Image: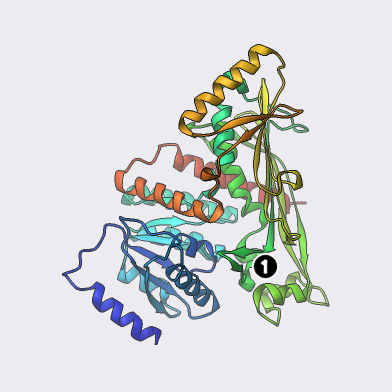
Amino acid sequence: MRFLFTMIITAITASPAIAQKPVRLITLDPGHFHAALVQKSMYPQVDETVHVYAKKGNDLDLHLAKIKGYNTDVKAPTGWKEVVYEGDDFFDRMLREKKGNVVVLAGNNQLKTDYILKSVQSGLNVFADKPMVIDQKGFVKLKQAFETAKRNKVLLYDIMTERYEITTILQRAFSMEPALFGALTKGTAAEPAVTKESVHHFYKYVSGSVLTRPAWFLDVEQEGEGIVDVTTHLVDLVQWECFPGVTLDYTKDIVLTSAKHWPTVISRNQFAELTKVQQVPAYLKKYSDAKDDISVMCNGEINYRIKGVHAKVSVIWNYKAPDGTGDTHYSIMRGTKANLVIRQGAEQQYKPTLYIEPLVHNAAYDNDVQKTVEKIAQQYKGVSLKKNDKGWEVIIPDAFKEGHESHFARVTEKYLEYLSKNNMPSWEVPNMLAKYYTTTQAQKLANKK
């Protein structure tokens, strides 16, 4: 049935009477739900027909089911038409046919860097989920990929959704206001100037239903260790917030001081619940004990200096969040006049909340804070302050609180803008390299111990 459906769509879209929109997506080997989230929204400049290339199997079926769910959503249905090619030669077939001009990648990270390099070598733009690379060997290929993309005049970019979280946006905005924040401190190894911590869960809900993880997601050789996966977002935010608009040189500006990693144990029953696979695959046996409990090296911590500023990022993976909770984020930026803190615990009802905690206590400073908030509120209407024992809670209107899934539309829109206007900031590529240098060097350092 799928083959017949594909043939019909192919015949329709091939008709010269139908003008193609300038952006045509190719979804390659989708194995992570982020590939589908790119299509949770429609975009005016993107053709509704998406060509999908993958092996036959559960990863592909789950991806197509999510797209179908978006197409049939009661509140905001999309209108995507998926043209599917299934076969072991899917990658070569995609490169040969070039049915689109933007390759969307979100899946097995062991293969992703090769997909990226060969796609840009073939003159295709690439929009890739994090991480684009999971080890030092891959980092060398990624450098080559960026050089090739520049030479071939194609756009290679990763999906940094966390830049679109409103508390992070405002934390960055306030840190750029000297009257309120002062200047970013240098910090120390014991008390870094910037700390970002993230807690994630294997068992979670996505788009209203329980997420089925592929079995390979628990294999760090395929997914990557936690220290090179979720930390990609955290390292990106350190760079984006602490050094806005600054071009980083990873050979000079990044110094790793320490890194560590540790496992989360997934029981056999949890594995079956999570993946819908009853038998633990052979490739996971090297992480398993006699009971088939799997030790997943998904937790990590990186301590480093970036342009002389002490930074710390860490990620923790638990199996399942307690009822009423979910993934959480903690962040602090230490200024000479105030600390800017994002908390997401029980006190905040597990919703990210931004606080201004001053080191200066006088009427003149309080007045400067009020003026700064009024200035910020000109762009972010309705932002205000609520006094507390430590300073102020930043009150943010619900209109700005989109949620993680909606952030995929925001970052996709930004990518499409860069693609159409050729206006990606000059710092983006060197800073992507700095980011992946940090994570892959940390992974190397952690594995030495």
In this view, the residue in front, 127 or 82, is 82
Q: Is residue 109 above or below residue 312?
A: below
Asked whether residue 49 appears in the rendered view, the answer is yes
**Which residue sits at x=61%, y=36%?**
395
**Which residue sits at x=64%, y=15%?**
365
Residue 322 in the image, given as x and y percentages of width and height: 76, 60
Q: Is residue 345 above or below residue 87?
A: above
**Which residue sits at x=50%, y=24%?**
375
Asked whether residue 131 appears in the rendered view, the answer is no
Q: Which residue is mark 1?
A: 218
How was the colour assigned to the protein in this rendering?
rainbow
Q: Is residue 265 above or below residue 289?
A: above
* Element type at mark 1: helix
In this view, the residue in front, 394 or 38, is 394
Q: Amino acid at mark 1?
A: Leu
Residue 131 in the image, given as x and y percentages of width and height: 55, 55
**Which residue sits at x=63%, y=60%?**
224
Residue 227 in the image, given as x and y percentages of width and height: 67, 52
Q: Quadrant of residue 363?
A: top right
